[in-house]
Amino acid sequence: MKIKICYFAKIREQLGVSDELLVLPDGCDNLDGIFNHLRERGDPWQQVFSGDKKILRAVNHEVVSDNCTINDGDEVAFFPPVTGG
């Protein structure tokens, strides 16, 4: 399965990449699985996607839950919580 991942704001800065095409391993078909897959890359990925960080997720421009199923060709976005002031 191949997806596009977009990284925004501080996440983009920490990783040094704004987007990428990613081929997911078999069995990696939800957002929790993608988080685990990205953490396996080591630092800085492990730091950004550690369990204590709040990261919002969207699939095809819709905010979704952690266990949302991912399909071939989906666009997944990760971004920090937005605060107003």
Image: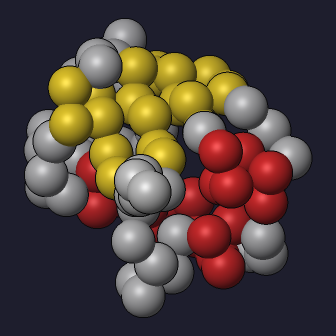
Residue 42: image location, x then y, percent: 74, 74
Q: Which of these two is toward me, 2 or 62?
A: 62
Residue 82 vertical position relative to residue 36 in the rendered view, above or below: above
Q: Quadrant of residue 51?
A: bottom left
Q: Quadrant of the N terminus?
A: top left
- Residue lying at the far front in this picture: please name it: 85
At 19% from the left edge and 57% from the top edge, which residue is drawn? 66
Q: Quadrant of the C terminus?
A: bottom left
Residue 54 vertical position relative to residue 8 in the rendered view, above or below: below
Q: Is residue 12 left or right of residue 7?
A: right
Q: Is residue 41 left or right of residue 49?
A: right
Q: Quadrant of residue 26?
A: top left
Q: Is residue 81 left or right of residue 15?
A: left
At 42% from the left edge and 88% from the top edge, which residue is drawn? 52
- Residue lying at the far bottom in this picture: please name it: 52
At 44% from the left edge and 34% from the top edge, which residue is drawn? 77
Residue 28 visible, this angle: no
Residue 42 visible, this angle: yes
Residue 63: image location, x then y, percent: 21, 36
Residue 27: image location, x then y, percent: 27, 49
Protein image colouring: secondary structure
Tag count = 0
Q: Which of these two is toward me, 83 or 3?
A: 83
- Residue lying at the far right in this picture: please name it: 16
Q: Is residue 37 left or right of residue 42?
A: left
Residue 72: image location, x then y, percent: 31, 17
At 68% from the left edge and 55% from the top edge, which residue is drawn? 10
